[in-house]
Image: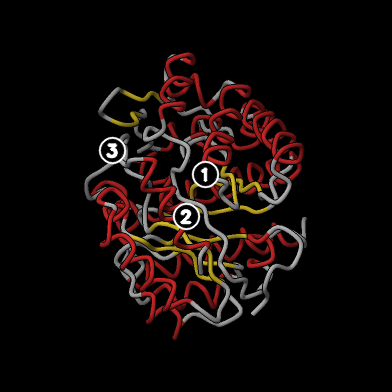
Amino acid sequence: MIEHAPGKPLLRTLAGEAVWPPPLWLMRQAGRHLPEYRATRAEAGSFMDLCLNPRLAAEVTLQPVRRYGTDAAILFSDILIVPWAMGQGLTFAEGEGPRLPPIRDAAALDALDPEGATARAAPIMETVRLTRAGLDAHHPATALIGFAGAPWTVGCYMIEGRGGGEFHAARRALHADPGFFAALMEKLEAATLAYLLAQAAAGAEALMLFDSWAGQLPPRAFRRWAIEPARRLREAVRAARPDLPMIGFPRLAGPMLAEYAAETGMQAVAMDTAMDPAWAARHVPPHVALQGNLDPEALVAGGPGLMAEADALLGAMRGRPFVFNLGHGVEQVTPPEHVQALIARVRGG
């Protein structure tokens, strides 16, 4: 293992080094558990106004780095920016989540514009540039992660018109109208690739692909609609930017995580809360970093239980490339002092 070598710990880990103590960042680390985020959100107005205001979005991206000293900042945005940028309507109702006009027929599909999506998402790229400049000036050891939603997960929202539930309409569409479904996925994949590469050009140092609803797919469909798009996206990013690592998160993949890791070419795969890290350490190729997977509720609870969970996770991951994180996002009610205590424990080795 490497101790105290120079460079950004996250990028060294994604390059295959077993850095110890491991780098740490938390999904949804810039969010409602922070009072400074709530103040900035109030200044912005709506959630979409915040996402599309580069100055304020960069500010909330940097807030957890300032407070906690995390080893990565992840762009503050949303996985549904890509369908919005393709021309699908998008609103966020307070307390209800996203709402989109459902894409369920050829006319709605034809109206989507993947070629113009990156131009419409220009404010997001300015957020990346401002964030990277802030990190370079004040947090030079902290890496910047850009991200997008994976085609299957984003497609679920686009077809269903909202989040949550079992995504019955999307799951039926891939069986009942495979031509329509494949055409939607093709448009989404093209727009997602352009969006990721634009973030890289603006200064992102790593990219993460969130497939939050991959666990809805049975194995055969998982291979076609989770693994294959991720592999193509990874290969296309590598062709354009060989230096740029990627993290894949096929949430609730279960034992399919090992196949995803082996087939996609990702430098790291994220484990959800339900994954046994000891199983993942045995079955995921040793050159692929693992990321995860502390229960966010343990972080809310704090105390000895949190420390026991953190110690167990560290014990399972010692000796291989590993990024300490949660198995899902930080809960709104998480006390910041619990995050600070966790980071101290992890960095104590």
Q: How many residues crowd mark 3 within 10 Å: few (<14), some (14–19), many (20+)?
A: few
113 and 193: which is toward the camera: 193
Which residue is located at x 47 percent, y 55 percent? 343
Q: Is residue 229 above or below residue 114?
A: below
Distance from disc 2 to disc 1, alpha carbons, whole Å, reads 8 Å
Quarter in which the N terminus is drawn? bottom right
Closer to viewer: mark 2 or mark 3: 2
Q: Amino acid at mark 1?
A: Tyr
Distance from disc 1 to disc 3, alpha carbons, whole Å, reads 17 Å
The answer to whether residue 151 is left or right of residue 75 is left
Q: Which residue is mark 2?
A: 343
Q: Is residue 338 above or below residue 46?
A: below
Question: In x, y percent, where is residue 61?
Answer: 56, 35
Q: Secondary structure at mark 1?
A: helix
Question: In x, y percent, where is residue 284?
Answer: 49, 80
Distance from disc 2 to disc 3, alpha carbons, whole Å, reads 18 Å
Q: How many residues crowd mark 2 within 10 Å: few (<14), some (14–19), many (20+)?
A: some
53 and 170: which is toward the camera: 53
Choose the circle earlier in sequence order: 1 or 3: 1
Closer to viewer: mark 1 or mark 3: 1
Question: In x, y percent, where is residue 236?
Answer: 69, 59
Q: Amino acid at mark 3?
A: Val
Which residue is located at x 45 percent, y 27 percent? 37
Choose the circle earlier in sequence order: 2 or 1: 1
Q: Which residue is mark 1?
A: 68
Q: On the image, which quarter does residue 206 sit in?
A: bottom right
Q: Secondary structure at mark 2?
A: helix
Q: Which residue is mark 3?
A: 333
Which residue is located at x 54 percent, y 50 percent? 186
The answer to whether residue 149 is left or right of residue 205 is left
Choose the circle earlier in sequence order: 2 or 3: 3
